[in-house]
Amino acid sequence: MSKSGTLSPAQVGELYNNMHWLFDILMGDNRHIGYWDGSENDGISPRDRFTDHLIGEIGAGPGQHVLDVGCGVGGPAVRLAKTTGATVTGITVSSEEVRLGTSLAERESASHLVTFEQVDAMNLPYPDNSFSAAWAIESLLYMPDRIRCLREIHRVLKSDGRFALTDYTERLPLGTEQQKIFTETFMVNPLIRVEEYDDLLAEAGFDRVTRRDLTAQLQLSCQESDRDLPAKLRQIEETTDKVFSGYYREYALRASSLEHDYLGYVMMVAHKN
Ligand SMILES: C[S@@+](CC[C@H](N)C(=O)[O-])C[C@H]1O[C@@H](n2cnc3c(N)ncnc32)[C@H](O)[C@@H]1O
């Protein structure tokens, strides 16, 4: 981590290259929070249900091209393509995630619709006006320059294009020491308050911005992670050793208490005119 407390895209790429096996144990193909809305007997996992909500928000369909900014190992991109018939380009800074996403698309018979590329979202190699919609699910917190990324997304969207983002926010102010613990524990860049996203999206050129506070969903996700922790620790220990699983246990407890006490979660939807 640099002195300013910001992680570079290359450092984030390394993190995801080295730790994908751990995120796999913890979250499977969807590396984001879950969503509970009372329809828990529908056989859909809370994480897939959250992806489905976002699919509804960006309203993609056949013939449209969607950019998935910070695509992880491809769970959301593949679900989006299979559900809507849209084509999807998923971008990540991790070469390992490109490999895993590509093999997931193959397994799910969605290779004709979904591709994954190693691209820094703050520097998009795509022409202006090339995508019908975009989303960034829990990826902006890894970016040292959020406004640059948002401007890039705005640039590559077509007129009337929709953009949805979800992110952790700073619900209660973190002191300097807590901020340090937070960025080191989560390996992310400093969080911002929810109101700051209104300003950033406007500054990037978006309008018709709506926001939904999903902190209650974050809390439910935390409760689920706390409940599942002993089983996950056993899996981590089988994959590595007692030392690492002990280290992870400490990490998880610190992360959980920060999430419960200080963090919020937001979903924002915006349009390009
Ligand atoms: C928590 S994961 C979320 C993955 C995915 N959106 C999901 O919901 O399953 C964060 C993702 O953001 C990506 N990311 C972080 N910084 C990035 C950057 N500068 N450009 C592109 N992707 C980035 C990481 O590589 C990782 O895939």
Image (tube, helix red, strand yellow):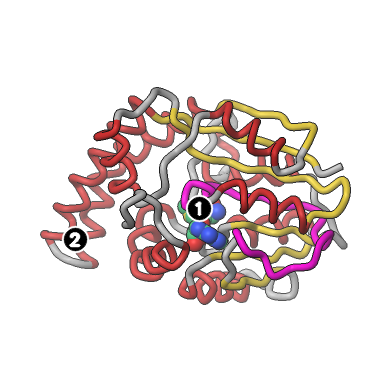
Q: Position of residue 201 (x, y in %)?
A: 68, 38
**Residue 7 visible, this angle:** yes
Task: Tell me: 72 left or right of 129.
Answer: left
* Residue behind mark 1: 143
* Residue behind mark 2: 237
Query: In this view, which residue lies farthest toward the left?
Result: 243
**Residue 30 visible, this angle:** no
Residue at the spot 20% in from the left edge and 67% down from the top edge: 240
Q: Amino acid at mark 1?
A: Met
Task: Identify which residue, 154 or 18, lies in the foreground.
Answer: 154
Beta carbon at label 1 within 8 Å of ligand 1: yes
Q: Amino acid at mark 2?
A: Glu
Image: 65 above or below 56: below
Instruction: State yes or no: residue 188 in magenta.
Output: no
Residue at the spot 36% in from the left edge and 33% down from the top edge: 259
Q: Which residues are magenta?
A: 122-143
Residue at the spot 44% in from the left edge and 30% down from the top edge: 170
Q: Quadrant of residue 227?
A: top left
